[in-house]
Every structure is written in structure tokens, then in C-alpha cells.
Image (cartoon, helix red, strand yellow):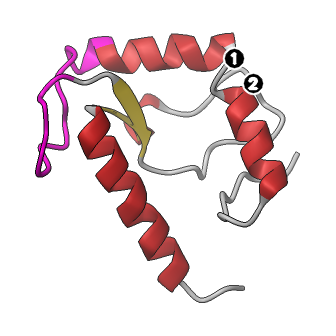
Amino acid sequence: MRAAAKPDEDAEWFAWYNTYLQSDGWKRRRQMVLRRDEGICTAYLTGCTGTATEVHHLSYDMMRQGDLDAHQPLYQLRAVCAACHQQETAADRQRRNKLPRT
């Protein structure tokens, strides 16, 4: 099982990730994070609605492609509203694109 590195051009990884987001393990983990953060957006970025409806991955380091049991630690996940999630995802992708490829 290889580490899930999440490069944007990796279609295989995104296909697995989309399946992962539909798994019972992720659904349980997502609900745990939303409850832990009491349904409040933890990002507070421009346009924030204040109500968390989504969960943002701070890191993909602990994810393993093929693992649908959602073993990712809760400290790597945070509750966010859709507006903040969109901004955080865009910023993550921009940072990744600036990193040198190995």
C-alpha cells in the first residue's frame, strides 16, 4: 500500500479518494469531527458562514491508498464551512504547485 501523496495530476489517487469519501469509515470520521468542533467553522476566512458542513484534511500523510477504514488521526481534520473549505483547498493546491517535484 503506497502513501497517498495527493498530486493533482494523479487520476488514480483521486479516483481512490472519491471512493474513500463515500466509505462508511470516512462518514463516521467526518461526523466525529463535525461533533467535536460543535458544527462551527474553525477557519474563519473571508466569506465564512460560521456553520461547518464540511471537513478539511490538514494533511494527507497518514492516509493510505486502498484503506477505506479512515485511519486518519482526528487532529489532521477540521470542520469548515463550504466557503472556507473552497479557499483552504485552493491555497493547498497553490502551495503544492510551488513545491519542487521530487
Q: Where 24 falls versus 21 (above or below)?
A: above
Q: Residues within 10 Å of mark 2 (few under 14, many from 20)?
A: some
Residue 13 colored magenta? no
Give the tally of numbered discs: 2
Q: Which residue matches tag 1?
A: 23
Task: Give the extent of the magenta segment.
Answer: 35-51
Q: Are marks 1 and 2 in contact (CB under 8 Å)?
A: yes
In the rendered image, residue 54, in percent from the top left (x then y), is placed at 37, 27
Disc 1 crowd, CA 10 A, few/some/many (<14, 14-19, 20+): some
Q: Quadrant of the C terminus?
A: bottom right
The image quarter in which residue 90 lies? bottom left
Q: Is residue 17 left or right of residue 40?
A: right
Q: Nearer the viewer, mark 1 or mark 2?
A: 1
Task: Classify mark 2: helix, strand or loop.
Answer: loop
Depicted 102 relative to depicted 6: above or below: below
Judged by its main secondary structure, the magenta piece is loop
Q: Position of residue 69 (x, y in %)?
A: 71, 20
| Residue 4, position as x, y percentages in the image | 72, 52
- Look at the numbered disc 1 and give the secondary structure of its residue: loop
- Going by the numbered disc 1, the residue's amino acid type is Ser
Q: Extreme bottom residue here?
A: 100
Give the mark nearest the N terminus, 1 or 2: 1
- Residue depicted at x 43% and y 74%: 95
**Left or right position of 44 against 93:** left
Residue plotted at (67% across, 19% down): 22
For disc 2, the marked residue is 68
Amino acid type for the residue under numbered disc 2: Leu
How far apart are the two marked residues, 1 and 2, measured between alpha carbons? Answer: 6 Å
Q: Residue at x 30, y 54 (%)?
A: 87
Image quarter (top left, top right, bottom left or bottom right) of the N terminus:
top right
